[in-house]
Structures are given as structure tokens and as C-alpha cells.
Image: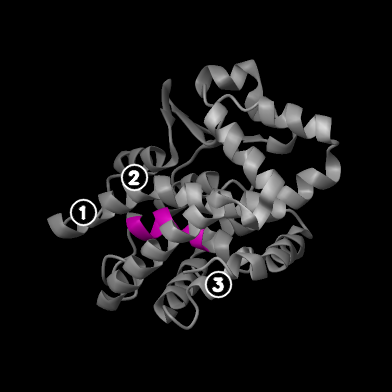
Amino acid sequence: MMILYHGATSVCSQKARLALAETGTSYESALLDLTKGEHMTPQYRALNPDAVVPTLVHDGLVVRESSLIVDHVDRTAGGGLMPREAPAAAASRLWLVRTLAIHEAVNSLTFATVIREQERARRTPAEMEAWLASTPNPQIAAKRRDLMEKGPESVFVDGALHVLAGVLRDMAAALEGGVWLCGGTYSISDLALTAYVDRLERLGMAQLWEGRYPSVAVWLSSCRSRASYASAIEDYVPAGSAAAVRAAGARAWPAIAARLR
């Protein structure tokens, strides 16, 4: 039996749910409310000391880190998402590794925009500092503090844009070979990147690829047309929140666009 501890709009949780949906794997859902700090409880941190989501528990085996969860789910289901050909399999594994940097980039842009607006609106300065100080990793706390204070002017936004420029360039190059990143068949590579590119579009930042890399827009539309997208991502979007997320991104976009190189 698999139990998935996850957050509704967490991109890494979306990634794990996509794997479960694409493989048709049954699981028990343990949905955590991150806004209430349910990922910070001693019970959850016993499973995941970093207090992040998702975490998968499979018959007592604890699997952390979304790319490892995706790989574990795929292997358990028979390995159908990993390409059989060695070059495509190597490319897929590289994409899985690269999602660590991609996640950091998308996380920075999310915190610099919608999360910054939400947290600054609902917390006093003292509450904000307490919230930041509760983050177990001091480096992550420092990053979030900078993003909360400076928003689109943060150096972490510059770093995010640098990473994403390379990702989108390489995606476009891979998509020259077909509809999907590894050619004509949907694979673990497409699954691994869907939630991140989807988040950027939801933040109103599709201009990062529109015009220059139109194949990325076609790819995202194809990913969204799959049944797994609805059950793993769309169904978890809180009612009425989509417009607020896009508006926050739109307000920050001019400052972000000015930092593009």
C-alpha cells in the first residue's frame, strides 16, 4: 500500500500525483495544509526531517524527493514511463536530476510574487520573522527572507531566470524531435517537467517562452490535455485562486522582465 503525504498546490506534490495517475497506481492520500504548518509537525518530520512535501510511504519504505518518488512509482508499476532506448533513458534521467535546479527556480519566482503578496498581507513583521525562522534549513530561510523583502528585485530571481533560460532552450531543442521531450512517446521526462512549466504559465510568465520557443507552448497544451493533468493538478487548485495567482504574477512581471538577459 502506498501513502502519499502531499500539498494541494505544491509543484513537487503535483509531480508525484502525476506519476501515480499516469501509472494507474492506487494510493492513500494524506493531504497536508501547508498554510497551517501541518508539514512542520513532529509526526511528519519523523518521516521527512526537511519538512517538505511530498513523501511517499510504500509498505513501510519511506521515499523522499519527488523525482525519486516518480521513479519509484514507475518502477513499481513496471517501468513504462522510462524510455527503453539508452540515449532517451539517459536524457530522461538527466531531466530528473535537473528538476532540482528547476524547482529552486520556480520556487523563487513563486515566492517573489504570489506567496510574497499573501504572506505580507496576512502577517505582521514579527509573525513574518517567526515564520521564516521556523524553516529548518537556515539557507532556505535566508533565501525566503530576501524574497519576502525584495520580491522581483531579489538576486534569487536573477538566478531563477538564468536557470530557466537554459531549461527552455534545451526543451525546445528536444522538442524538435517530436511532440514529447523524448520523441513520439510521452515519458517520465514530460511528467517530470509538467508541473514546473504549468506553474510558470499560471503565474502569467509564459512570455519566457512565447515567441522564442513556441514548441514549449504546444508541449504544455499537450500535457494539459492528458487525463492525469486534471486529477493531479487542476482538481487541487483552490476555487477562485487561479485569478489571484495570475494577477500577482502580472504585477511583478514588469520588474521581472526588466531583469531578463
Where residue 48 sits in the image (x, y, percent)? 51, 24
Q: Residue 58 vs residue 121: left or right?
A: left
Cα separation, mark 2 vs mark 1, equals 13 Å
Judging by the rendered image, the residue that carries numbered circle 1 is 89
Label 2 vs label 1, nearer the camera: 1
Label 3 vs label 2, nearer the camera: 3
**Badge 3 amino acid:** Ala
Q: Residues within 10 Å of mark 1 (few under 14, many from 20)?
A: some
Which quarter of the picture shows residue 165? bottom left
Judging by the rendered image, the residue that carries numbered circle 2 is 74
**What residue do we see at 52% from left, 26% from top?**
50
Judging by the rendered image, the residue that carries numbered circle 3 is 206
Q: Is residue 58 above or below residue 214?
A: above
Q: Which residues are magenta?
A: 189-197
Label 1 vs label 3, nearer the camera: 3
* Whether residue 228 is visible: no
Which quarter of the picture shows residue 201? bottom right
Where residue 119 sits in the image (x, y, percent)? 77, 43
**Badge 2 amino acid:** Asp
Q: Give 56 or 41, whichever is nearer the viewer.
A: 41
**What residue do we see at 59% from left, 22% from top?**
44
**Badge 1 amino acid:** Ala
49 in magenta: no
